[in-house]
């Protein structure tokens, strides 16, 4: 069986502090982070994906996704050409070594001609790739050379470790049945989206939040967990614990109990009226 295409994709934590991201709606943030992290992405930042697949993974209607993609195009962040996503600054935020540059060149060469031309004009990859093959124009001292070699070695080690992890994941998935592996990959993608959705709404995503999301996802599934992430903010829960305590077995939130009305004491006039009644 062909192994599932599993990748590791890191996103800079400053992503959520970017002035452009801060202005996006929750749905726009979710789509943007999805375009950077979904299973179709590659090192070049150009890949084929349908609106239907984006809708299936994010739970957002295709018509709304189309509207969001057009906004991102107008803002010069992406191009969506014949079901190919092209991300403008994808290469800019990668630490590209020679091995990665070879991979990117190969990916670009395999694109359909129309997509390749659109990619070259929009991304201008030569800005990020040519520096790897350009010899240094100025002599440097031995210490600087050694430091650069150390950095290159470290990047090579990181690349090898990442490859080993990917291979381990592929081997693990291969040992499962085809249906099981596809289902598992789909669930992992949904979890990734839910965690990004939490961060888009609440601006933080630590260990406790991730554990909460995984627990809710395993109990109630994708749609209900997505709703709970939104309701955590809308209903002003003070903590994850209080939200868990407020949940019914089906994932709905219990209505808040009516506050007890304080018993009102009798006024002086009422007391006088009662006393006069019994004194007659």
Image (cartoon, grey):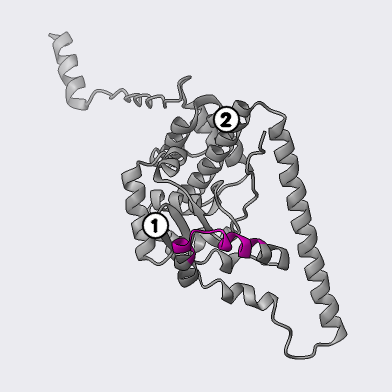
Up the image or down, 248 lies above or below 162; here it is above
Q: Which residue is mark 1?
A: 24
Q: Locate the C terminus by quadrant.
A: top left
Task: Determine if the magenta segment contains residue 193.
Answer: no
Question: Residue 211, how many percent across, how many down?
Answer: 61, 36
Q: Residue at x 49, y 59 (%)?
A: 112
Q: Quadrant of residue 171?
A: top right
Up the image or down, 134 lies above or below 268; here it is below
Question: Residue 214, how many percent across, how many down?
Answer: 58, 34
Residue 43 in sight here: yes
Of residues 116 and 235, the one nearer the viewer is 116
Marks 2 and 1, how far apart at CA: 31 Å
Asked if residue 268 lies left or right of residue 20, the reply is left
Asked if residue 89 lies left or right of residue 275, the reply is right
User: Which residues fall within the magenta stretch?
Assistant: 103-116
Task: Determine if the magenta segment contains residue 114.
Answer: yes
Please count the marks in the image: 2
Q: Residue at x 54, y 25 (%)?
A: 219
First-in-chain label (2 vs 1): 1
Of residues 44 and 245, the one nearer the viewer is 44
Label 1: few (<14), some (14–19) or many (≥20) C-alpha neighbours in 10 Å: some
Residue 212 in sight here: no
Asked if residue 99 lies left or right of residue 275, the reply is right
Give the SS element for disc 1: loop
Residue 258, which numbered label? none
Q: Residue furthest front?
A: 113
Of residues 248 and 8, the one nearer the viewer is 8
Question: Residue 160, how many percent across, how many down?
Answer: 78, 55
Q: Which residue is mark 2?
A: 183
């Amino acid at each position: 069986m062909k192994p599932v295409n599993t990748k590791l994709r890191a996103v800079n934590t400053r992503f959520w502090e970017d002035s452009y991201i801060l202005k996006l709606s929750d749905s726009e943030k979710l789509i943007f982070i999805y375009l950077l992290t979904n299973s179709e992405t590659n090192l070049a930042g150009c890949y084929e994906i349908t609106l239907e697949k984006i809708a299936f993974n994010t739970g957002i209607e295709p018509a709304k996704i189309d509207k969001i993609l057009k906004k991102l195009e107008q803002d010069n962040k992406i191009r969506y050409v014949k079901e190919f996503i092209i991300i403008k600054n994808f290469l800019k935020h990668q630490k590209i070594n020679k091995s990665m540059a070879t991979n990117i060149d190969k990916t670009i060469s395999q694109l359909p001609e129309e997509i390749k031309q659109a990619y070259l004009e929009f991304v201008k990859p030569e800005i990020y790739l040519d520096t790897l093959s350009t010899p240094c124009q100025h002599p440097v001292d031995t210490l600087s050379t050694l430091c650069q070699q150390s950095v290159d070695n470290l990047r090579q080690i990181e690349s090898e470790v990442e490859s080993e992890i990917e291979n381990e994941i592929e081997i693990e998935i291969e040992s499962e049945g085809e249906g099981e592996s596809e289902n598992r990959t789909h669930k992992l993608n949904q979890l990734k989206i839910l965690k990004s959705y939490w961060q888009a709404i609440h601006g933080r995503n630590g260990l406790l939040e991730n554990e909460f999301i995984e627990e809710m996802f395993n109990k109630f599934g994708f749609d209900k967990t997505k709703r709970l992430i939104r309701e955590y903010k809308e209903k002003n829960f003070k903590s994850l614990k209080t939200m868990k305590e407020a949940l019914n077995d089906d994932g709905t939130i219990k209505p808040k109990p009516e506050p007890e009305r304080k018993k009102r004491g009798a006024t002086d006039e009422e007391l006088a009226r009662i006393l006069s009644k019994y004194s007659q």
